[in-house]
Image (cartoon, rainbow, N blue to C red):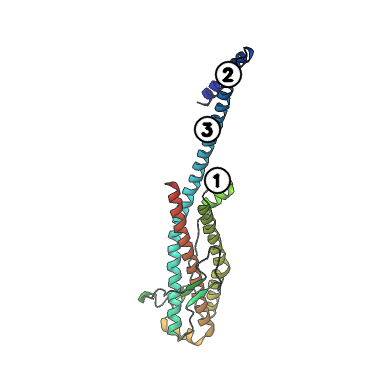
Amino acid sequence: MTARTSSFSFKGTQMISRRLYEHVRTHNWFAVAIDFVIVVVGVFLGVQVSNWNAARVDRMIVESYLLDIAADIRLDLAEISRVKASALERIGFSEYILEQAGVTNIATELVLSRASADDALQGFETFKIPPGATPRDEDRTRLWTLATSTYMQDTNLMAFDALISSGKIELIRDERLMRDLRGYYYLVHATDRTQTRSIVVMRNYADQVGIERGLAPGALVDEKVLVDLVTADRTLSATLAATRERAALQLLLTTALEEKGRNLLGQIEAERR
């Protein structure tokens, strides 16, 4: 198809050149003007077709990357639901042990900033810690483990990283979509850093405190024995309180990430329609 088009274009140019030469030689200026207009219009149409083809290819490239990103976000949302369930379990079980131990000064909210944020956490500056999961009968001997263990979020970044490394992200012309895309992945990285620098550190510290007091991770401990230990040991009660607040922080971040993920997914799907 390309060879035929090139051959036709070349032959057409030769024909116009011969005609133009004949018209100039015979001083037929009207015909010269018509031939000139034909050449200009032909060039203009050729450029427009080339631009249209380039724009079509760009749209196909963007759509391909957005499809992959949408698939990653769906996986993220499924992962987020598991992280939230784990965080609510830690909040509820820590709070239950503390209450049974007579600890009353339990935080009711998590404050990230007293001022309004203008970044990805806008609207989440203050987070009211919700009621957590209630222990079941089969949980009574595993309260320490369930209160201090942590389910870490593993977010999918392959599609977005591929878009960035390709240098094609600027092909996305929708400013709102671009802003929300960057905002979502900014929060993804912020969540990952917080997990690494704060939540994992707290989990490891809780493990250390527990081991020093005979509460090994995964060990079965009678509820009354555990409550008596926490009642008598301020370090244990403070560790549980800090664990609860770190769980609330993880819940805050994943809640914000879930909201932004669902919004971004809706935009991507609307972009494709």
- What secondary structure is found at the residue carrying circle 2? helix
Q: Image point 40% across, 73% down: which residue?
A: 133
Q: Nearer the viewer, residue 20 or 94?
A: 20
Eye-nearest disc, 2 or 1: 2
Q: How many numbered marks are there? A: 3
User: Mark 1 = which residue?
Assistant: 171
Lower sequence index among marks 2 and 1: 2
Q: Amino acid at mark 2?
A: Phe
Percent position of residue 201, x then y: 56, 71
Q: CA distance from mark 2 to mark 3?
A: 29 Å
Q: Amino acid at mark 3?
A: Val
User: Mark 2 = which residue?
Assistant: 30
Q: Nearer the viewer, residue 180 or 187?
A: 180
Q: Amino acid at mark 1?
A: Leu
Percent position of residue 202, x then y: 55, 73
Residue 168 sits above or below residue 102 on the image: above
